[in-house]
Amino acid sequence: MFSSLFLTGLFFLFFGALLPLLSVRSGRYVRTATLGFTAVAAVLLLVSSAGVFTGDVQEEIASYNVSNALSFSFALDRLSSFFIIVISVVSFCVAIYSAGYIEHGGGNAKRNILAGLMNVFIASMVLVVASTNTFSFLFFWEIMSLASFFLVMYDYEKKETRKAGIFYFIMTQLSTVFLMVGFLALYQVNGSFNIEAMGSASQLMTTAIFLSLLTGFCIKAGVIPFHKWLPYAHAASPSNISALMSGVMIKVAVYGLMRFVLYVLGPVDWWGILILVLGTISAIFGIIYALKEHDIKRLLAYSSIENIGTILIGFGLYIIFQAHNLPAIAYLGLAGSLFHVLNHGVFKSLLFMATGSIVNATDTRDLEGMGGLIKKMPYTAALFLIGSLSISALPPLNGFVSEYMLFAAFFSSNTLGDPMLTILLVLCLSVFALTSAFVATCFVKAYGIMFLGLPRTDACANAKEAKKPMILGPAILAALCILLGVFSPALLSASGYGTLPVPDLMLVGSFLLATYAIIWAALYHSYPNKTRVGATWDCGTPLSSRTQYTASGFSQPIMRMFKATYKTKEIPERTFYDKQNSLFRSGEAKVTLLKFFEEYLYMPVGKKVMSLSIRVSRMQNWNLDTYIAYAFVAVLLVLVYVGWLI
Amino acid sequence: MNIDANYVAYAFLNTAFIILISPLFMGVAKIVKAQAQGRIGPPLLQPYYNLLKLAQKERVYSNKSSAITKITPYINITIMIVASLGIPLAFAPENSGGLGNIILLLYLLAMGRFFMAAAGLDAGSTFGGMGSSREMSISSIIEPITIIVFAALAFTLNTMDMHQMFQTAAQEMSFLNPALILVSIPLFIVLIVETARVPVDNPETHLELTMIHETMLLEYAGRDLALMELSHAIKQTMLMAILINILVPWGYAREFTAPAVIIGMLLFLAKGIILATFIGLTESSMAKMRLFALPNLFIIAFFLSMLTILLEVFR
């Protein structure tokens, strides 16, 4: 029953992909129909995967043999169905949103291809998660990478987009290389491509496979230091695609990591420590970089890096506590991690979509060119506010629940019985706390600068509210932010985590609502309710958009305190009339940010690869004699290897 | 989670008590500072008069501001009242109502801060923006210390629930526990930072050097300002209560009877006045620190709280 629903959903996606590609030049109705297919498919996939998830059953879907050893085969279990729930919820809302969004910019052909490829992209993500062997996993992984590459390249006319696309393409291929190495090594051990518990292998082999797969998945998930593609690609792609990539695609990599570590390799405790430390580093640096950013889409992209870090922290905690035989606390970590996968999918897609509406309306991604939008786009402003509150983990919204579970797991670290490990966890805890405080700062900045105050440009002063579908899509997610938070106790017990000690947010929410209502009602009636509208206090200088605080100004204190992390250079150049440097003549001051990872990691590696390939390319000298010599040596080597010469 | 009659009684008493006494502690600190400077200072009940006066005045909104400015005072006071349910001042019912969780408490406070900082940016004035920026920066870098302090408390008292922490502290009379004495120093620094006092901020002024908390409220008038000031006072009392009820829990009501509760309340009032005097003296004896010198203070607090953790881990 669930498998037939699942296959029907996939067929809808398939036809949705085919329809616009067959009639590329046709008009709007084709695209709308396609997105309708996507939405229907998402509902079908959601129903089938929710059925599998709550029923806790193993559901075989289908298997197609390609050759003797290679086959595509799919099945759903609890882990994969959970990730398909995330994919389908986000895809549904993105499909609705796209019906409005897609009509901006580009011609008919481009818009149709965007709608069609989006279906390919969603289908490939679903199939990666549902794969039961490494062959079909890698196959659809590549389809997913290619589809997303083309989607990132939507605005290929822009130089920035081309750079982002190529960067993304190279990184994603690098990730595939690591995965392929890991999968082939697994094949060596297991003798089959099935994703199943690994047979006996030497410790070295297991470690090597783990590290290779970890690197591969970390590149795709955008874990620091492999994160550099993420801000480029997310900023360059259309906003509905950013929502899918950030909300869902990077989670597919998390799924891969969880699947292979838990079900195939069998974790060891130092893996947990490694994942925890990687997660902590990603979380703190992700948000530190997000704070300085004033391109709103890049800010959101860096914040995605932070959230992937948070997810990894939970997963690392699970492995550590499980290795120390503390399953109750371990499940707190795992549940927190998985719930954060869902939550991040919900609020980050919401934020990306709301941002897309704003970028369409104001024609800029720069925070310094926005402001005052709450008056022009009240619905979008309300949606973005809910997303910001949720991502800042404020109760009673959903972000709080997952972060709370991680905090609770951290707070139990004194039960580990290993002092050094406890101290490591406490240090990670303090960094995690700093991270979550920075998230609030970052989103106060984003919200305040975008929506409050005075408009900073004319485009912004004349902005129009987004079209209905572009409000409806994110509105569903905003409702989910509230519902997933308030009904978290019921949801957790429905998914079998009912025993976890999580504060009852339903209660907190109703207390907040009741208190607010009482105070409001009491004050409304008992005191003189006079109000007056006046001008903002401006010390006599007329207020203008230039006098208010800017995004860079807002984050300046933190940038200064964390100077070492940003590698900022403040260059004040001043000339004076006199030798004592007291009569100021002229001057210029600037702050430059060092692109640390690019300059110290990516470029050196790139240069090494470049020089190596130049050396290799010297072997190709366009000379027939040389090539015959190569062929001869090759034949000789083969003969030696086979043993015919000796 | 079930709410029984005891809890309802507790909720009303605790809320009424904290609203009533919070302005008093503000007044005490003010008088102490005035005396230290050789002035007489305002009457003890001046904060109450101020609140009453403000409540009767009309509210003025900027023509540039939006709904955020209007809802923030209500949201702030709501959050403080709900959060204060998690901090039983003088007596704790058996049933903590699930609101006593310290992480929940911290994030409720963070929510109030989020709205306050947003409201600071709302009117488009430089003052408000500067206040929000500094407030968010400072509260961000104090956050790791707050968490470590609470983790140390959770390790020592073996619970994450504020009600149970206070009960355990009252039962064991653990004021001689070195971990708790050590952790009270960073807790005091957190209190100073969160309540915007010297050396971090100066509650008396909104001059350029101290533009943190007060500047965010610059655009508020009348009843809204009264609500904001009251919520700030409640926040201060909550943080004071954590320090008092863990370090010196003498007289904390162990059972829910009228005499015990009254004694508990009176003793809390006395201890609160002493602590407020101490806060006033600390403020008078220190100069305001430069904004960018603050991380040094925070590192001291971080070091001390980490030391507590080490003490607990290796015990």
Image: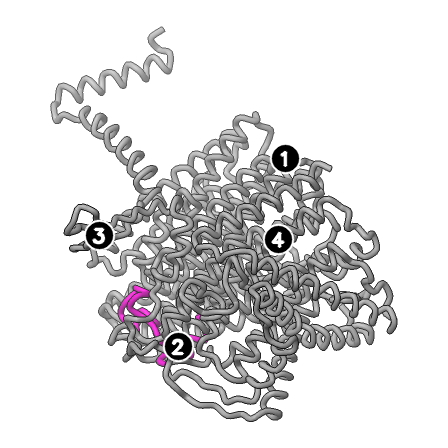
Residue at mark 1: chain: A
Residue at which label 4 appears = A407
Q: Which residues are magenta?
A: A358-384
Quickly name the residue at label 1.
A420
Q: Identify the residue at image location x=80%, y=55%.
A: B168
Q: Do the residues at pointers 2 and 3 share their chain?
A: no
Query: From the viewer's perspective, is A603 left or right of A267?
Result: left
Name the magenta segment's main secondary structure.
helix
The crowd level at tag 1 (other Cα within 10 Å; few <14, some 14-19, many 20+) is few
Determine the secondary structure under disc 4: helix
Indicate the position of residue A212 as horizontal and vertical percent values.
Answer: 46, 35
**In the displayed structure image, the side of residue A619 where residue B224 appears, left or right:** right
Q: Residue at x 87, y 66 (%)?
A: B255
> For numbered disc 3, what is the local secondary structure?
loop
User: In the figure, residue B44 lies in which quadrant?
Assistant: bottom right
Specify whether disc 2 shares its chain with disc 4.
Answer: no
Query: Closer to the camera: disc 3 or disc 4?
Result: 3
How many angstroms separate mark 1 from mark 4 (CA)?
A: 19 Å
Give the mark nearest the N terminus, 1 or 4.
4
Amino acid at the residue labelled 4: Phe
Closer to us: A393 or B281: B281
What label sits on residue A520 in the rendered view?
A: none
Q: Which residue is mark 2?
A: B123
Q: Are discs 2 and 1 both within one chain?
A: no
Q: Specify few, some or many for label 4: CA neighbours under 10 Å numbering under 14, 14-19, or 20 or more.
A: many
Q: Which residue is mark 3?
A: A582
